[in-house]
Amino acid sequence: MDRIVEHLWIIPALPLLAAGIIALLKRPHRKAAAALAIGSLGLAFLVSCVAFAATLHPAAGAGTVRLTHNFAWFDLGESTLRLGWLLDPLTAGMLVMVTFVGSLIFVFSVGYMAHDPNFTRFFGFLSLFAAAMLGLLVANNLLFLFMCWEVVGLASYLLIGFWFQKPEAAAAAKKAFVTTRIGDLGFFLGMVWLYHGTGTLLFYDKGAGCLEQGAIASLVAQTTLGGMAVSTAISLLLFCGAAGKSGQVPLHVWLPDAMEGPTPVSALIHAATMVAAGVFLVARVFPLLGASAAGLPADGHVPHTAALAVVTWIGAITAVFGALVAVAQSDIKRILAYSTVSQLGYMMMGLGVGGPAVGMFHLLAHAFFKALLFLGAGSVIHGCHGEQDIRRMGGLRKAMPATFATYAVGMMALAGFPLVFSGFWSKDEILHAALAWSPSRLPFALGLFGAFLTAFYMIRQMWFVFFAPSAHPAARHGHDTRPDAAAPHDSPPVMTVSLAILAGATVAMSLLATPVWPWFHAYLGGHLDHLHVGWDADGAVLATMALSTVAVALGTGVSWRLYSRSATGTDAVERLVPRLFGALRGRLYVDGFYAATVFRLNRAAATAFDWIDRFVWGSLAGSTAWIATGFSWLGRLLDDAGINPGFDAGCAGTRGTGRLVSLFQNGQTQRYLRLVGGGIVAIVVAVAWTGKK
Amino acid sequence: MASLDQIFVALKDWLVAFVPVALQPLAGALLSIVAIMAVFPGIFALTTVVERKLLARFQNRPGPNRVGIPLTKIRLAGFGQFAADGIKSLTKEDIVPRNADRIVHFVAPFVLVAPAFLSLSVVPVGRNMAALDFRETGLLFFFAVGAATELSVFMAGWSSRNKYSLLGAMRGIAQMLSYELPLILSSLVVVMMAGTLSLATIAERQSGVQWGVVHSWHVFTPWGFAGFLIFLTAACAESNRTPFDLPEAESELVAGYFTEYSGFKFALFFLGEYLGMFAISGVAITLFLGGWNAPFTFLDWVPSWMWFFGKLVGFILFFIWLRATLPRLRVDQLMDLAWKFMLPMSLVNLVVAGVWHLAASWPHLLRWPLCVAILALPYWLLSRGFQTRFKTRTYRFAEESRPAPATAAAGP
Amino acid sequence: MTPYLIVSALLFSIGFAGVLTRRNAILVLVGVELMLNAANLNFVAFWRHGPNPAALDGVMFVVFAIAVAAAEAAVGLALVIAIHRHCRSGNVDEASGMKG
Amino acid sequence: MNPIFAILAGVTVGAAVAAMALRNLVHSVLCLTVSLVGLALLYLRLGAEFAGFVQILVYVGAVAILIMFAVLLTRGGEAPPGRIANAPWSGLAVAAAVFAMIAWAIARSPALRGMAKDPAQPPLSVKAIGDKLTGDLVLPLQVVALLLTAALVGGVVIAMSEKETE
């Protein structure tokens, strides 16, 4: 057992090695690159399975399997910085999922990127990404986790901007990088604070780790600003990082734009890995979030702490927000992106109301079906020669049967069709936990509404892509300049096989966490030996199932009815409520405030927002962005042409200060050096002077 | 015989004994300086005549054969020529271009000659006969002092304010810098094997005996042989001798960096160049050809300094022979040779020396073929690249401007 | 010992003065070289007069410093050439495109 | 003070001053070379033979030539017209202040006063240096090798970059 955890580093090291070797390969060595990347990740998958098997059998009476292996990294003055590997059910489950889904995505990429000249570079980046992600999972140290976290950010930057010659892609990559960086600032501060508070960053260290009883008790005991417990403050800071990575509402803007990357990247980033990192982080530090004066959260019981309440509310808002926006999008990948935002909201909500088991199960289930959906979308795009607008598709059911079948499975899982799809069970659990959440019932209602919307937009997408009469073949082919532009065709086997495997996994996942046999809970909670098959759920479970089924059915029915009867080309909802639809299509203007590029509903206001945005992104003052967003909402509602004079004054002041400061920075190195020299002399004189007395 | 071998050492000791003890080191140094300043310029004087005569012979003409002892009928087969040349250059007008940078122009020849003398002073010309023996850093001293040559070339070329001078200087510096690498690397092999930088010690180390009667010169090993060839080529380039005389290619650059020098300063440049050649030949002899050691044990009775100077004369004749037979390289070929052939080969040679050292206990039949193979393979690979690289140049623009014969025939 | 240190300080200050005042970028680099060499002289002097000369620390430091200085000179001069090509000038005060 | 030391120090410092003060760049660099040779001789006086010769080999043989090339490549061979210094007085004042500070520190240092006036020549064999380089300091040696390679490549790339883009 210990040997497994001692050698857990092999799992991230394998793809890292592959990335290193691929970096040295020349461009024409495409096969070698692909083989290296897939082979290394496949091997990592096998090792992960071994690690997973090791967590299945806890020692008698030990509860959860939690193996750690810590070692000294380097000495820092008096103290020693220690790193470590950690193997527990959370890690093991994620490892298997990431390597499995990742391998399939790699295989899919071989087909999808077959025509790209930078094929080898692509696989190098993919491997680097996988390595960083796996390193993040096995870390038993918040610092090491943070390092991998940043490498994940770097790799995602490289991958989203893979087609950097496209300005949108370059911009999207930058946006993703900068936006997540704002969250990371919170993460970093939280980490530093945690180190300050506990003196260690190891999660588990035989009772001395920062997530164990002693450290947390001391953190809970201290209070900071406004009587908040230090543990809560740290939790919220860490959650900032998680929100950035996982695209929770204020920081979600990068995620839809990240669609500019190649589709396998979207699948990898949005389904399996990067966005999951945030949720994983919250699950990892759950003891900290759930810590209250009463102590650590016990298994199966989720306390109501302030930190968890924040997580819940942000999650619930994100869930509904993403679903709403997804209703009006027309880019096939963008719909999926917003649906990811929405589902991530569910996960966070699940974590907040139901603890790691609930949230993580939705994460794993979502990873499979969302990877399936993205790869399916990739297959559709590939088959349609690069077309991404669903209104220009249609009738692909016949042209691409394999893609259609697998996509339908993914769709039903995402929408939560009952009984055999994993999405149903995982979402149901979240709703059930939300129903039982005593502080408020609103999250439950929001979740239910989200479920309705999910079914609605997925049916809308299915209808446009696969069922609608082939709308604008001329337009479609007119756009295509390639000589081999022909009718849509199904993708090569190397792509469809990945889809089929994922579809199978999606269905299979549904067996793991039904109320009849809640294996996953038992696994995460560490009481597998008490697990038995049988119905011992309360009536609320049944009620929730019924309610969510109704919501899904309602969504499906309404959507199908609206769209199947509408004329092609225009959107049914658009005709019904054009203003609302416009707002939704404009992604509720959130991007407008952040990036000031999308919608200029109000030119004057937008100019101000634009400036604010630049200011916000230009500096790291994320908090200003909050205020600015609030003000700009208000301004648009109250007065279309209104520009808050306070902003102007603030801007002028800032600009003036900037001018003043930039006077010193005149680009003349010699002048800087003179100041440095004079400064040194002054310091020495000062030190000597004071030392004499 | 031993007394003849050490005759100069004894002479110096005898002379030094006349001065007070406190001044003896100074007197010894002075004596050494005088000896060096007398012997090597003398060899230089003779070399100029020999070179002119030999070159003439190579070209089927008599060469200088008139000047003998003045006011007599004795001609000495023309060996009085150097005196005439010397007197001429001393009495000629010293022309300095109007725009020239006078100070630098004046200093440049001295910057060339002084280090040449200095570097000659570390060469052991016989047993116990090195004017300066740096036990720790002899070879390093040689290379460090040699570095000043480049500076002098630059000063001469730049201060003349003449484009041929400047171009010649640039070529010269580029060439010297490029060939300094193989030069140092190939002598590094000897340092590696000898374990010392002292030239005297290196020479002494080669007095061992192998194969019965042969002294163990470094050149009789695979690494020594390859190193010697590399060193010889690089030395040729370092001293600007044909076929590497591009810096002073008279058909292209008049006389290179000393175009604007005349009279005594020109003579100094001339002297400096030849002294540099002697010094580098002396180092080559010390490093590879056994220094002052005889080739065979039965020749040990010949005094050591005679061996050294005999080998030196051999080198001089060899260089003259090269000058008379080989055509000059083109600039790009020159650089290619340095960077793409000699540098890799000298690196390979370092490896060979290491292998030789590690395989010390192996039988010769195994050790020799292994080392030769390690050398031969890169040699073959590298020279294969040169065959494609050094193909006849096609003069694209010249050919295009010339009307093709077919169109000429079709014309009116 | 002290005379060496004073010479070193003088060299350092002369180099520093050159760095601070000369307009030509190459001479600024020359000043930097002088400053580096002044430091090297210190190392050698302290090695010679220090408590443990057998450890060779000062000399090793000088050898490394020379190697690094050579690299620095190469890159610095390449930069000067690049800037000269870009700005048609080798003066440091004209290459102030980064100014705020 | 030893007269030889005085001459060497005078030449070194004087050449350094000239290097920093002359108008013509080539003269400056030549003076720099003289100054560096003077430094090498000071090393010899201190008993650091190896360092001294390495100094000459690297600085006179390579760095000086390199700077000369840079001077000629940037058309600095002629004495530039106009100002050669930016605000010389304030710069000189800062430099003088720095010198005053260092000199003050040297003059007051109690550690220096405790040192032997002229300790015995420490043994310095090149072999010891070699052993050290390939023993304790093998990692720095590798790093320096890497640095030099990087500098070589970087120098080439920087100096030829514009040609590439044409």
Image (spheres, coloured by chain):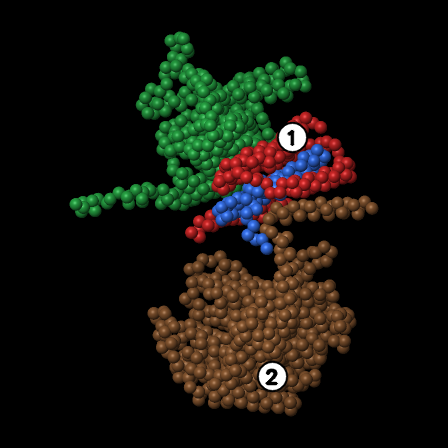
Chain B palette colour: green
Label 2 neighbour load within 10 Å: few <14, some 14-19, many 20+ = many
Q: Secondary structure at mark 1?
A: helix
Residue B135 appearing in the image: yes
Q: Secondary structure at mark 2?
A: helix
Colour-to-chain, blue? C
Q: Which residue in the rendered view is the most extreme toward the right?
A: A693
Cβ atoms under marks 1 and 2 closer than 8 Å: no
Residue A361 appearing in the image: no
Residue at the image position 56 percent from the left and 50 percent from the top: C96
Residue at mark 2: chain: A
- Between A283 and A476, the residue placed more toward the observer is A476
Q: Look at mark 1 in the image and give the residue it sits on.
A: D10
Q: Looking at the picture, does residue A473 appear above or below residue B169?
A: below
Residue A447 - label: 2
- Between A54 and D60, the residue placed more toward the observer is D60
Q: Is residue B165 left or right of residue D113?
A: left
Q: Position of residue B347 (x, y in %)?
A: 49, 42
Residue at mark 1: chain: D
Residue at the image position 60 percent from the left and 36 percent from the top: D21
Chain D palette colour: red
Residue at the image position 47 percent from the left and 89 percent from the top: A561
Observer-side mark, 1 or 2, equals 1
Which amino acid type corresponds to the residue marked 1 in the rendered image?
Answer: Gly
Colour-to-chain, brown? A
Residue at the image position 57 percent from the left and 39 percent from the top: D84
